Image (cartoon, rainbow, N blue to C red):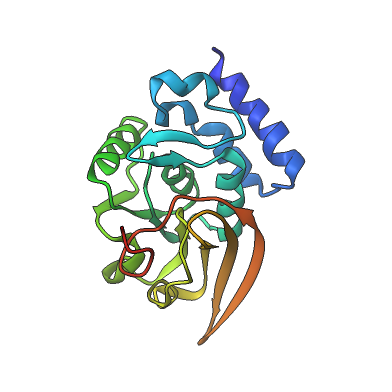
Amino acid sequence: MDFETERYRMVDTQLKKRGISDFRVLEAMRKVPRHRFIPPELRSSAYEDRPLSIGEEQTISQPYMVALMTECLRLDSEDAVLEVGTGSGYQTAILAELAEKVYTIEIHESLSEKAREILTDLGYTNVAFRVGDGSKGWEEESPFNGIIVTAGSPDIPSILESQLSDGGRLVIPVGSRFVQTLFTITRVGKSLQKREFTSCVFVPLVGEYGWREI
Protein backbone atom coordinates (compact mmCIF):
# COMPACT_ATOMS: atom_id res chain seq x y z
CA MET A 1 0.00 0.00 0.00
CA ASP A 2 1.33 3.45 -0.94
CA PHE A 3 0.86 5.20 2.40
CA GLU A 4 2.38 8.49 1.22
CA THR A 5 -0.09 8.77 -1.65
CA GLU A 6 -2.96 7.92 0.70
CA ARG A 7 -1.74 10.52 3.19
CA TYR A 8 -1.62 13.29 0.58
CA ARG A 9 -5.08 12.28 -0.64
CA MET A 10 -6.32 12.45 2.95
CA VAL A 11 -5.13 16.04 3.25
CA ASP A 12 -6.68 17.09 -0.05
CA THR A 13 -10.04 15.34 0.28
CA GLN A 14 -10.71 15.17 4.02
CA LEU A 15 -9.02 18.30 5.35
CA LYS A 16 -8.72 21.05 2.74
CA LYS A 17 -12.16 20.39 1.28
CA ARG A 18 -13.69 20.59 4.76
CA GLY A 19 -12.16 23.94 5.58
CA ILE A 20 -8.79 23.25 7.20
CA SER A 21 -6.63 26.06 5.86
CA ASP A 22 -3.67 26.55 8.23
CA PHE A 23 -0.62 25.83 6.05
CA ARG A 24 1.53 24.52 8.91
CA VAL A 25 -1.22 22.16 10.09
CA LEU A 26 -1.72 20.80 6.57
CA GLU A 27 2.02 20.27 6.14
CA ALA A 28 2.24 18.42 9.45
CA MET A 29 -0.66 16.19 8.44
CA ARG A 30 1.10 15.44 5.15
CA LYS A 31 4.32 14.58 6.94
CA VAL A 32 3.35 12.46 9.96
CA PRO A 33 2.82 8.77 9.06
CA ARG A 34 -0.53 8.00 10.73
CA HIS A 35 -0.21 4.31 9.84
CA ARG A 36 2.75 3.98 12.22
CA PHE A 37 0.45 4.71 15.18
CA ILE A 38 -2.15 2.08 14.26
CA PRO A 39 -2.12 -1.69 14.94
CA PRO A 40 -0.81 -3.62 11.90
CA GLU A 41 -4.13 -5.31 11.22
CA LEU A 42 -5.82 -1.90 10.77
CA ARG A 43 -3.16 -0.09 8.77
CA SER A 44 -4.98 -0.49 5.47
CA SER A 45 -7.57 1.91 6.97
CA ALA A 46 -4.99 4.36 8.32
CA TYR A 47 -5.98 7.29 6.10
CA GLU A 48 -9.73 6.81 6.12
CA ASP A 49 -11.89 9.51 7.68
CA ARG A 50 -12.71 7.66 10.89
CA PRO A 51 -11.33 6.81 14.32
CA LEU A 52 -9.66 3.43 14.83
CA SER A 53 -9.11 1.24 17.89
CA ILE A 54 -5.66 1.31 19.53
CA GLY A 55 -6.37 -0.88 22.56
CA GLU A 56 -7.32 -0.15 26.19
CA GLU A 57 -10.79 0.82 24.82
CA GLN A 58 -9.19 3.92 23.31
CA THR A 59 -9.12 5.24 19.74
CA ILE A 60 -6.98 7.30 17.40
CA SER A 61 -9.14 10.25 16.31
CA GLN A 62 -10.26 10.72 12.72
CA PRO A 63 -7.79 12.86 10.73
CA TYR A 64 -10.24 15.74 10.30
CA MET A 65 -10.79 16.08 14.05
CA VAL A 66 -7.04 16.00 14.70
CA ALA A 67 -6.53 18.76 12.14
CA LEU A 68 -9.46 20.86 13.39
CA MET A 69 -8.40 20.73 17.04
CA THR A 70 -4.80 21.49 16.09
CA GLU A 71 -5.86 24.43 13.94
CA CYS A 72 -7.93 25.80 16.83
CA LEU A 73 -4.77 25.92 18.98
CA ARG A 74 -3.09 28.36 16.54
CA LEU A 75 0.37 27.24 17.62
CA ASP A 76 3.62 29.06 16.95
CA SER A 77 7.01 27.38 16.68
CA GLU A 78 8.09 28.78 20.08
CA ASP A 79 5.00 27.60 21.97
CA ALA A 80 4.68 25.05 24.76
CA VAL A 81 1.58 22.88 24.53
CA LEU A 82 -0.03 20.37 26.88
CA GLU A 83 -1.81 17.33 25.50
CA VAL A 84 -4.25 15.55 27.81
CA GLY A 85 -4.55 12.01 26.44
CA THR A 86 -1.47 10.77 24.60
CA GLY A 87 -3.32 7.79 23.18
CA SER A 88 -1.55 6.45 20.11
CA GLY A 89 0.87 9.39 19.97
CA TYR A 90 -0.36 10.57 16.55
CA GLN A 91 -1.78 13.87 17.79
CA THR A 92 1.40 14.26 19.83
CA ALA A 93 3.49 14.00 16.67
CA ILE A 94 1.38 16.64 14.91
CA LEU A 95 1.85 18.98 17.87
CA ALA A 96 5.60 18.25 17.96
CA GLU A 97 5.83 19.41 14.34
CA LEU A 98 4.30 22.77 15.24
CA ALA A 99 5.40 23.66 18.79
CA GLU A 100 8.73 24.01 20.54
CA LYS A 101 7.77 21.66 23.38
CA VAL A 102 4.95 19.16 23.91
CA TYR A 103 3.97 17.87 27.34
CA THR A 104 1.68 14.85 27.05
CA ILE A 105 -0.17 12.88 29.74
CA GLU A 106 -1.78 9.46 29.41
CA ILE A 107 -3.64 7.53 32.10
CA HIS A 108 -2.85 4.14 30.52
CA GLU A 109 0.82 3.28 31.01
CA SER A 110 0.86 0.76 28.17
CA LEU A 111 -0.33 3.37 25.66
CA SER A 112 2.14 5.96 26.93
CA GLU A 113 5.06 3.56 26.59
CA LYS A 114 4.05 2.49 23.09
CA ALA A 115 3.58 6.08 21.95
CA ARG A 116 6.98 7.00 23.38
CA GLU A 117 8.62 4.16 21.43
CA ILE A 118 7.03 5.21 18.13
CA LEU A 119 7.74 8.91 18.59
CA THR A 120 11.35 8.21 19.56
CA ASP A 121 11.75 5.97 16.53
CA LEU A 122 10.40 8.77 14.33
CA GLY A 123 12.99 11.16 15.75
CA TYR A 124 10.89 13.46 17.95
CA THR A 125 12.97 14.91 20.78
CA ASN A 126 10.70 17.75 21.96
CA VAL A 127 8.12 15.64 23.81
CA ALA A 128 7.88 15.06 27.57
CA PHE A 129 5.72 12.15 28.75
CA ARG A 130 3.79 11.54 31.95
CA VAL A 131 1.53 8.69 33.09
CA GLY A 132 -1.31 9.84 35.30
CA ASP A 133 -4.50 11.87 35.61
CA GLY A 134 -4.41 14.35 32.75
CA SER A 135 -7.55 16.15 33.93
CA LYS A 136 -5.34 17.87 36.53
CA GLY A 137 -2.93 19.17 33.89
CA TRP A 138 0.81 19.57 34.49
CA GLU A 139 1.00 22.51 36.87
CA GLU A 140 4.76 22.60 37.38
CA GLU A 141 5.33 23.10 33.64
CA SER A 142 2.58 25.68 33.20
CA PRO A 143 1.61 28.15 31.86
CA PHE A 144 0.97 26.70 28.41
CA ASN A 145 0.32 28.50 25.15
CA GLY A 146 -2.06 25.70 24.24
CA ILE A 147 -3.85 22.82 25.93
CA ILE A 148 -5.61 20.11 23.94
CA VAL A 149 -7.84 17.51 25.57
CA THR A 150 -8.42 14.44 23.42
CA ALA A 151 -11.21 12.96 25.56
CA GLY A 152 -14.73 14.10 26.36
CA SER A 153 -15.21 15.97 29.64
CA PRO A 154 -18.48 16.60 31.54
CA ASP A 155 -17.45 20.25 31.86
CA ILE A 156 -14.45 22.53 31.38
CA PRO A 157 -11.91 21.87 34.17
CA SER A 158 -11.02 25.18 35.82
CA ILE A 159 -7.64 23.71 36.76
CA LEU A 160 -6.76 23.50 33.05
CA GLU A 161 -7.98 27.04 32.42
CA SER A 162 -5.69 28.21 35.22
CA GLN A 163 -2.69 26.69 33.43
CA LEU A 164 -3.14 28.81 30.28
CA SER A 165 -0.80 31.66 29.52
CA ASP A 166 -2.20 35.06 28.50
CA GLY A 167 -3.45 34.49 24.96
CA GLY A 168 -3.31 30.72 25.45
CA ARG A 169 -6.04 28.45 24.09
CA LEU A 170 -7.71 25.36 25.56
CA VAL A 171 -9.40 23.03 23.05
CA ILE A 172 -11.71 20.49 24.66
CA PRO A 173 -14.79 18.35 23.89
CA VAL A 174 -17.50 18.86 26.53
CA GLY A 175 -20.76 16.99 27.02
CA SER A 176 -22.06 13.55 27.91
CA ARG A 177 -20.16 10.27 27.78
CA PHE A 178 -21.61 9.62 24.32
CA VAL A 179 -21.57 12.96 22.46
CA GLN A 180 -19.81 16.27 23.03
CA THR A 181 -19.37 19.76 21.63
CA LEU A 182 -15.90 21.04 20.79
CA PHE A 183 -15.00 24.28 22.57
CA THR A 184 -12.05 26.65 22.46
CA ILE A 185 -11.35 28.75 25.57
CA THR A 186 -8.92 31.65 25.16
CA ARG A 187 -7.36 33.46 28.11
CA VAL A 188 -7.30 37.25 27.69
CA GLY A 189 -5.73 38.67 30.82
CA LYS A 190 -7.92 37.56 33.70
CA SER A 191 -10.91 36.78 31.51
CA LEU A 192 -11.77 33.68 29.46
CA GLN A 193 -13.46 33.75 26.06
CA LYS A 194 -15.36 30.63 24.99
CA ARG A 195 -16.16 29.65 21.41
CA GLU A 196 -18.26 26.68 20.30
CA PHE A 197 -17.31 24.70 17.18
CA THR A 198 -18.92 21.38 16.29
CA SER A 199 -20.41 18.19 17.65
CA CYS A 200 -17.99 15.32 18.20
CA VAL A 201 -17.61 11.96 19.92
CA PHE A 202 -14.61 11.13 22.11
CA VAL A 203 -13.86 8.50 24.72
CA PRO A 204 -14.52 9.80 28.26
CA LEU A 205 -11.93 11.88 30.12
CA VAL A 206 -11.42 9.84 33.28
CA GLY A 207 -9.95 11.62 36.28
CA GLU A 208 -10.50 13.92 39.23
CA TYR A 209 -11.77 16.75 37.00
CA GLY A 210 -13.41 14.51 34.39
CA TRP A 211 -15.61 11.44 34.63
CA ARG A 212 -15.23 9.20 37.65
CA GLU A 213 -14.36 5.72 36.46
CA ILE A 214 -17.22 3.30 37.21
Q: Nearer the viewer, residue 99 or 177?
A: 177
Residue drawn at x 71%, y 48% as measured from the top left = 21
- The quarter of the rendered structure image containing the C terminus is bottom left
Quadrant hosting residue 10:
top right
Question: Where residue 18 sits in the image (x, y, percent)?
Answer: 74, 43
Residue drawn at x 44%, y 40% as measured from the top left = 59
- The quarter of the rendered structure image containing the N terminus is top right
Query: Is residue 91 depicted above or below 14 in this figure?
Result: below
Left or right relative to 77: residue 214:
left
Question: Where residue 129 sits in the image (x, y, percent)?
Answer: 27, 50
Question: Where residue 121 sits in the image (x, y, percent)?
Answer: 31, 30
Q: Is residue 33 visible?
A: no
Question: Where residue 107 sits in the image (x, y, percent)?
Answer: 28, 52
Q: Nearer the viewer, residue 188 or 162?
A: 162
Left or right relative to 97: residue 50:
right
Q: Is residue 212 visible?
A: yes
Name, please, the residue furthest toward the bottom. Answer: 190
Query: Is residue 160 depicted above or below 40 in this figure?
Result: below
Residue drawn at x 56%, y 39% as measured from the top left = 62
Left or right relative to 108: residue 95:
right
Residue drawn at x 35%, y 64% as measured from the top left = 135
